[in-house]
Amino acid sequence: MKVELVVNEIFGPTIQGEGPDIGKPCIFIRMQGCDGECKWCDTKYARLFDEGTIMDETRILDKVHELNREGEVSTVVLTGGNPALQPLSSLVRTLKAHGYRVTVETQGSVWTPWLTLMDLVTVSPKPPSAEHEQPIADEFLKFEALNVVFKFVVFGTNDLEYVIDFIQTYPNKKVYLQVGTWGNSAVPDVMLFDYRVLVQTVTHHPVLSKVEAILPQMHVLLWGKRRGV
């Protein structure tokens, strides 16, 4: 029986604008539905389940193939919302059977077994500035079977303190920092200024300087807050 999923949008080819795959060509499958209500969320349109489109995996795969008609892109990114809320194991297996490298972005509030199928899991815990801070489930933190990294969006001192506490508590986790963009901070000049400040702060800090990388939101620098790019 085909599994029906709730999808917000499927788009690409484009580049991954965040995390360890930043700049890598990919196609995005944005799942509908989220268990968070972050103040600075830039995908509020993907929050409510009843605002998405119901699609089965065959229809999703057909759309991916349509976008990737030349076969030039090898990575598919599952994002949201929070994709961990939906039963995606069959879709992931199907994508991988067709030769795709499949990655996922989730906030880490929900553990689901299909995450073990992923080529890359990026967990983005919500810091104090989100005003919807959620603790990371212990079973997720213990997940070591595949490539798991943690990406923190930071807007200021309180968020950095949150990251420092995480690094000190879980010193063996791979951590990426990303400058926050919301409202006026999404303007390129402001974003670059905030990015410079973050770089200067982190590189001179005895704990934060241990992070894997300090990143901008590359897609926001290129296209602003446009959807589908």
Image (tube, rainbow, N blue to C red):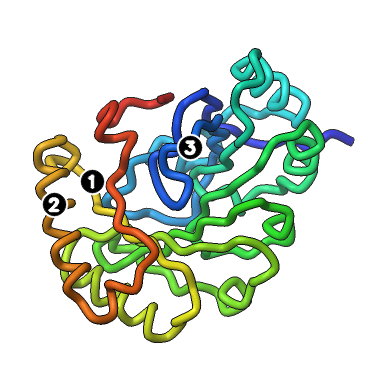
Q: Given this view, does label 2 or label 1 mark the residue nearer the observer?
A: 2
Residue identified by numbered label 1? 181
User: Which badge, 2 or 1, comes first in the chain's sequence?
Assistant: 1
Residue 197 image point, x, y percent: 12, 58
User: Which badge, 2 or 3, comes first in the chain's sequence?
Assistant: 3
Quadrant housing residue 26: top right
| Residue appearing at x 45%, y 32% in the figure | 15
Residue 181 image point, x, y percent: 23, 46
| Residue appearing at x 38%, y 79% in the figure | 167
Give the secondary structure at mark 1.
loop
Residue identified by numbered label 2? 194
User: Which residue is the extreme one toward the bottom?
Assistant: 169
Front residue of this view, candidates 102 and 87: 102
Looking at the image, is 136 positioned above or below residue 226? below
Looking at the image, is 90 positioned above or below residue 196? above
Q: CA distance from mark 2 to mark 3?
A: 24 Å
Residue 111 image point, x, y percent: 63, 65
Front residue of this view, candidates 181 and 22: 22
User: Which residue is the extreme one toward the right?
Assistant: 1
Looking at the image, is 219 positioned above or below residue 205? above
Q: CA distance from mark 2 to mark 1?
A: 9 Å
Position of 198 with respect to 71 (left or right) is left
User: Which badge, 1 or 3, comes first in the chain's sequence?
Assistant: 3
Position of 102 with respect to 129 (left or right) is right
Q: Quadrant of the N terminus?
A: top right
Mark 2 touching mark 1, by CB under 8 A?
yes
Give the secondary structure at mark 3.
loop
